[in-house]
Image: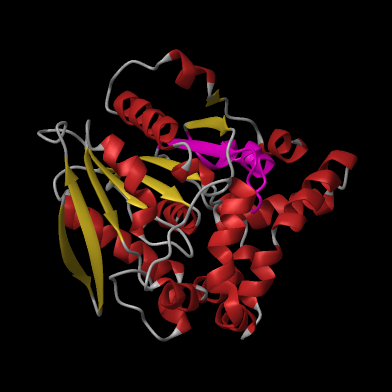
């Protein structure tokens, strides 16, 4: 593994490149972490993928060894997409990368793909526990317009999981929570609810306070129409069934937004997907990447392929 920093305008991004046994001539996989993590969250998955591919992780702006901009608007999706483009261009200038995102890493991956910032630079996208903001907003509005018993249950289940959005969006609340002991309680809560350990790290408090600007900078995107945000990049969705923050049902309505879509459910929690099930996640990512690169479609992946429905069918779900 080697480390370096690359620059995108005024922001410097700390990246790691894993050159494992499968590196010569192999595709490059870029793993993007969420909030309030840094790239360390990917270490178990990256180590396994590096046996077969070139693997890259990086600290997003506001986290780890990367720059922490002060202004909230510098955390808007356009800047995150530009960072991702800069990483892809630096580590694989002549070949599209395969993108994998978790939590906010997945959210920004969707934003970059559907916004056109990564046109021609991404060969596939694996999304874990991080919906496109516009798609999520459309999902909520569609169910409010058609409040069937199932839709009401879907909304109730997601709203029960979405308390953190309010904490993140209301000025001053998140900062107060983190400063009044949230950074000490957070690892304990994750371990007790998901059974995974999150070791303490020196920069965690700074990451938590800086990264909360992601919610404020991008909140208005929730109101944008989701149907204009589509991609022709092959997408694999891994939906943890015990996720306490993102309902697995939300990803059942994604087919209209991706020309080619696969969806797999994983018996894990939000962080458990990458920390408790790294072998399963690495294997699924590897299968998907190899298939997109021209290899055969394994039976498990074929069973996860989602047919393209009409909008009416998607809303009915």
Q: What residue lies at 39% left-to-right and 53% top-to-bottom?
A: 41
Q: Nearer the viewer, residue 149 or 231?
A: 149
Q: Is residue 215 visible?
A: no
Q: Is residue 157 above or below residue 210?
A: above
Q: Position of residue 213 (x, y in %)?
A: 50, 76
Which quarter of the figure has residue 207?
Answer: bottom left
Q: Position of residue 250 (x, y in %)?
A: 66, 44
Q: Is residue 212 left or right of residue 121?
A: right
Can you name the residue that lies furthest to the right here?
Answer: 149
Q: Is residue 204 left or right of residue 188?
A: left
In the rendered image, residue 247 lying in the magenta stretch gets the answer yes
Q: What residue lies at 30% left-to-right and 76% top-to-bottom?
A: 67
Q: Identify the image quadrant of the C terminus.
A: top right
Q: Is residue 288 above or below residue 138?
A: above
Which quarter of the figure has residue 290?
Answer: top left
Residue range in magenta is 234-259
Can you name the residue that lies furthest to the left here?
Answer: 24
* Colouring mode (rainbow / by chain / secondary structure / one colour): secondary structure
Q: What residue lies at 28% left-to-right and 22% top-to-bottom?
A: 294
Q: Nearer the viewer, residue 207 or 83?
A: 207
Q: Is residue 133 left or right of residue 66?
A: right
Q: Is residue 221 above or below residue 291?
A: below
Q: Position of residue 45 (x, y in %)?
A: 35, 41
In the rendered image, residue 182 lying in the magenta stretch gets the answer no
Q: What residue lies at 56% left-to-right and 33% top-to-bottom?
A: 266
């Amino acid at each position: 593994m080697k480390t370096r920093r690359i620059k995108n305008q005024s922001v410097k991004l700390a990246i790691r490149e894993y050159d494992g046994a499968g590196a010569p001539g192999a595709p490059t996989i870029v793993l993007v972490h969420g909030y309030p993590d840094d790239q360390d969250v990917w270490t178990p998955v990256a180590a396994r993928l590096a046996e077969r591919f070139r693997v890259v992780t990086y600290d997003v702006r506001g986290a780890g060894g990367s720059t922490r901009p002060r202004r909230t608007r510098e955390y808007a999706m356009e800047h995150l997409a530009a960072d991702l483009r800069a990483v892809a261009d630096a580590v694989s200038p002549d070949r599209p990368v395969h993108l994998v995102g978790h939590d906010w890493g997945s959210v920004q991956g969707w934003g970059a793909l559907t916004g056109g910032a990564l046109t021609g630079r991404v060969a596939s996208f694996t999304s874990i526990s991080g919906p496109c903001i516009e798609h999520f907003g459309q999902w909520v509005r569609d169910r409010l317009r058609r409040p069937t018993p199932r839709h009401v249950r879907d909304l109730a289940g997601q709203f029960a999981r979405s308390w953190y959005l309010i904490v993140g969006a209301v000025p001053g609340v998140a900062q107060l929570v983190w400063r009044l002991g949230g950074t000490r309680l957070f690892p304990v809560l994750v371990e007790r609810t998901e059974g995974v350990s999150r070791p303490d790290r020196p920069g965690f408090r700074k990451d938590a306070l800086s990264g909360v600007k992601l919610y404020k900078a991008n909140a208005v995107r929730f109101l944008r129409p989701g149907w204009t945000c589509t991609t022709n990049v092959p997408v694999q969705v891994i939906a943890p069934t015990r996720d306490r923050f993102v309902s697995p049902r939300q990803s059942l309505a994604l087919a209209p937004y991706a020309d080619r879509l696969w969806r797999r459910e994983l018996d894990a929690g939000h962080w458990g997907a990458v920390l408790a099930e790294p072998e399963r996640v690495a294997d699924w990512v590897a299968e998907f990447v190899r298939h997109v690169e021209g290899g055969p479609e394994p039976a498990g992946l074929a069973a996860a392929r989602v047919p393209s429905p009409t909008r009416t069918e998607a809303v009915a779900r």
